């Protein structure tokens, strides 16, 4: 089903952005219905206005999706704000992407969601995070997931951020790898909240795990064989409560965590214990 003609209002003037834009009310594109929806910020410059994320950061997005086995044909992609910002509006984004404008444009996103019926939504960047989950700060919340009304939301950085900061590309790909574990149903109905472990929240994790006797863990790797140097461990996930999990993308912190737990005689339950043990040993991260 093509939502363009069905939902688009080419004369929309619900908010002031419609008065100045050169592309007004660009509805998202992709598979309908679809289990997976991707929501960005505002539409960028493109040749074909009917294809969301067609150029620019769309290239990073497509590359990232390919690493977890997804293509445009598998998902529906859209934005929070449907009009293209002018250069001036782009320079003053906090005003252009204000709460009132987002709320007015939410009318279209709500309709898209009703027709696409996603089970999983990937939120790209702080604007989507704020608009949908009312949380501030994408760097603090990247890797965060939450289930609301039967839909699991997962947040990561906006791919446009990778143009200015290419060093964040590995983190973007790590987040996508975690998203893959969620959409593949590995943690379905188990994970409501996923937290990325950082130096800042490491003590909080130790505090929360201190009474747990058993800790489930699982590694995500790029391949099957740890001896292939070009393949890496993407992240390590742990869980010790029904409704939350923690993910280590910093394997130095994971090593510290394992040693801390072993000193307290906690028991680890691996999804693929032998496999994970071999990877950790060969890469000299930690012995479990
Ligand atoms: S941004 Fe959304 S609400 Fe505002 S004019 Fe464009 S389509 Fe309408």
Image: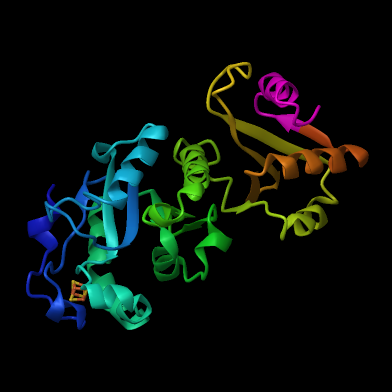
The x and y percentages for residue 209 are 79, 50
List x then y, in percent, for residue 2: 12, 50
The colour scheme used here is rainbow
* Depth order, front residue of 286/148: 286
* Figure disc tally: 0
Report whether 37 appears left or right of 73. right
Residue 75 spot, x, y in % from top left: 29, 43
Q: Which residue is drawn at 66% across and 20% down?
A: 275
Q: Nearer the viewer, residue 286 or 89?
A: 89
Instruction: State yes or no: residue 218 in magenta.
Output: no
Residue 97, visible in the rendered structure: no
Residue at 54% across / 52% down in the picture? 143
In the rendered image, the quadrant that contains the C terminus is: top right
Q: Which residue is drawn at 24% across and 59% down?
A: 112
Q: Is residue 152 visible?
A: yes
Which residue is nearer to you in this view: 71 or 157? 157
Asked where in the image residue 257 lies, by quadrant, the reply is top right
Q: Report whether 129 appears left or right of 281.
A: left
Q: Report the magenta residues as a range.
A: 269-287
Q: Quadrant of ligand 1?
A: bottom left
* 281, above or below 174, in the image: above
Does the magenta segment cover residue 273?
yes
Give the quarter of the image for residue 130: bottom left
Height in image: 147 above or below 236? below
**Which x, y percent locates residue 73?**
24, 37
């Amino acid at each position: 089903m093509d939502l363009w003609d069905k939902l688009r209002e080419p004369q929309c003037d619900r908010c002031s952005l419609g008065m100045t834009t050169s592309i007004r009310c660009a509805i998202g594109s992709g598979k309908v219905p679809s289990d997976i929806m991707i929501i960005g910020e505002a539409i960028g410059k493109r040749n074909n206005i009917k294809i969301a994320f067609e150029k620019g950061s769309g290239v990073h997005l497509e590359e990232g999706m390919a690493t977890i086995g997804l293509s445009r044909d598998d998902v529906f992609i859209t934005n929070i704000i449907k009009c293209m910002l002018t250069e001036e509006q782009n320079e003053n984004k906090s005003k252009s992407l204000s709460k009132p404008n987002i709320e007015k444009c939410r009318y279209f996103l709500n309709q898209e969601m009703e027709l696409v019926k996603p089970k999983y939504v990937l939120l790209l960047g702080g604007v989507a995070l704020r608009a949908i989950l009312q949380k501030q700060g994408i760097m603090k919340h990247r890797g965060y997931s939450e289930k609301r009304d039967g839909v699991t939301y997962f947040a990561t950085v906006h791919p446009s951020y990778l143009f200015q900061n290419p060093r964040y590309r590995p983190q973007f790909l790590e987040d996508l790898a975690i998203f893959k574990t969620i959409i593949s149903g590995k943690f379905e109905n188990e994970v409501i909240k996923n937290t990325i472990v950082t130096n800042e929240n490491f003590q909080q994790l130790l505090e929360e795990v201190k009474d747990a006797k058993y800790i489930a863990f699982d590694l995500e790797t790029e391949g099957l064989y740890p001896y292939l140097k070009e393949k890496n461990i993407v992240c390590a996930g742990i869980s010790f409560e029904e409704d939350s999990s923690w993910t280590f993308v910093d394997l130095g912190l994971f090593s510290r965590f394992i040693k801390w737990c072993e000193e307290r005689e906690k028991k680890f339950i691996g999804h693929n214990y032998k496999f994970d043990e071999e990877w950790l040993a060969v890469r000299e991260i930690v012995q479990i």
